[in-house]
Image (cartoon, rainbow, N blue to C red):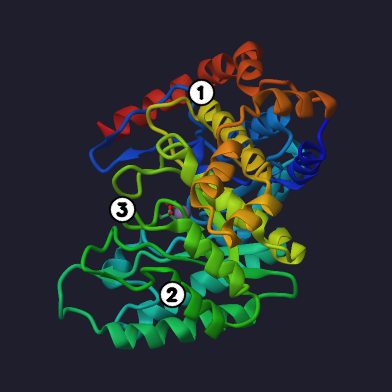
Amino acid sequence: MSTMYARCESKLDEFRVEIPSWGFANTGTRFGKFAQPGAATSLEEKFADAAEVHALTGVTPQLALHVLWDLPGGRADVAGVKQLTERYGIQAGSINPNLFQNQEYKFGSLCNPDAGIRRMALDHLLGCADIAKDLSSADVSLWLADGSNYPGTQSIRKRIVWLEEALGATHDRLSAGQRLLVEYKPFEPAFYHTDIADWGMAGHLAQSAGPQARVLVDTGHHYQAQNIEQIVAWLLHLRLLGGFHFNDRRYADDDLTIGSIDPYQVFRIFHEIFNEEDESLVAGIAYMIDQSHNIKGKVEAMVQTVVTAQELFFKAGLVDRERLAELQAAGRTVEAEECLRDAFWTDVRPALEEWRVRRGLPPNPLTALHESGYVERIERERAERNAVRTSTYA
Ligand code: PSV
Ligand code: MN
């Protein structure tokens, strides 16, 4: 095995992917939901599905939790979650506040013009920091739907100040080693202005909140044609990159399988990460998946996602960086580009299969899932409950 491959394999050993609890539940579009017979109908089933993905891939020991969907009782639900983490051997991953579903949040949560509603939102966020602490979860991952639909209807300036105050207060609540991740998104559900619309705003808020705050890059949260890897390079340079929500997109925040539309982009993001020389910065990157599938089978899609992420990660690791630096310095444009493309076009699947076999994992996790009968079993066990759910949405 070449030194390059050996180096990639050891990087791959450290590459962990956190999967979202909401990726196993029935979801849809604003037009409706297509219930799947095997979709998880409880938090326990989400943990069971996550454990199956981890058994097959060996790299997904953490499940991101969405408070309200997964811990509707807040802190009172922590004991139950702890039991599930022990039963299924899956740890709680990032804790995701929900500041978008309550009726009160029509005009915003942390940025609502009503001080009482801002307080309610902040209390929820502080509660999430406490839940994260109780579950020994490293990250509170904040995405804010706040914004407005029409010019002149909200004060953009006042809302900046309210955000600075709220995130500062949340930062104060973190314990040592915990982080606040600030996620940005340009539009949806708000269509005129969104309070945390891009990485500059998220970066400023993270910096003003305190040293334990970082920016979270959701690959679906950019305008068409935006150069995401350049944003990643800047965030690394500024020591502000906290993590990713990985998915793919064609039009908006489509939540499609990573690499299904533009695998070269994911490769280029990983390339920028491999360019980072400070190991401590790289170690701090939380790779999370943020996808909810309504056409693909959920467990199947999650396994496919993890495998795809590994493939693109491995390919990026194969870039001959020393040669690339020489070519860049000499202005040899075509050769530099080809140096990058050589790695991208390398078929790494056989190497990955060997890597898995050496670690006692199935060489092809997707085939192993199909052969395991797991999906058929959960479809049998959960079909009735999901049928009830379908009629609920009829
Ligand atoms: C919003 O689009 C988002 O990306 C946020 O991360 C949410 O927490 C997640 O999707 C699930 O709705
Ligand atoms: Mn996201």
Taking 102 as reference, is 163 above or below it? below
Q: Is residue 148 visible?
A: yes
- Label 1 sits on what residue type? Arg
Pointer 2: what residue?
200
**Disc 3 element:** loop
Give the left or right position of residue 284, taking residue 38 as reference: right
Taking 148 as reference, is 53 above or below it? above
Identify the mark at residue 224; answer none if there is no mark.
3
- x%, y% of residue 178? 69, 69
- Give me the C-alpha separation between circle 1 and circle 2: 44 Å
What is the quadrant of residue 311 in the picture?
Answer: top right
**Disc 2 element:** helix
Viewer-nearest of labels 1 and 2?
A: 2
In the rendered image, which quarter contains the C terminus?
A: top left
In the rendered image, which quarter contains the N terminus?
A: top right
- Viewer-closest of 308 and 183: 308
- Label 2 sits on what residue type? Gly
Identify the mark at residue 382; answer none if there is no mark.
1
- x%, y% of residue 367? 62, 16
- Viewer-closest of 55 and 360: 360
- Label 3 sits on what residue type? Gln
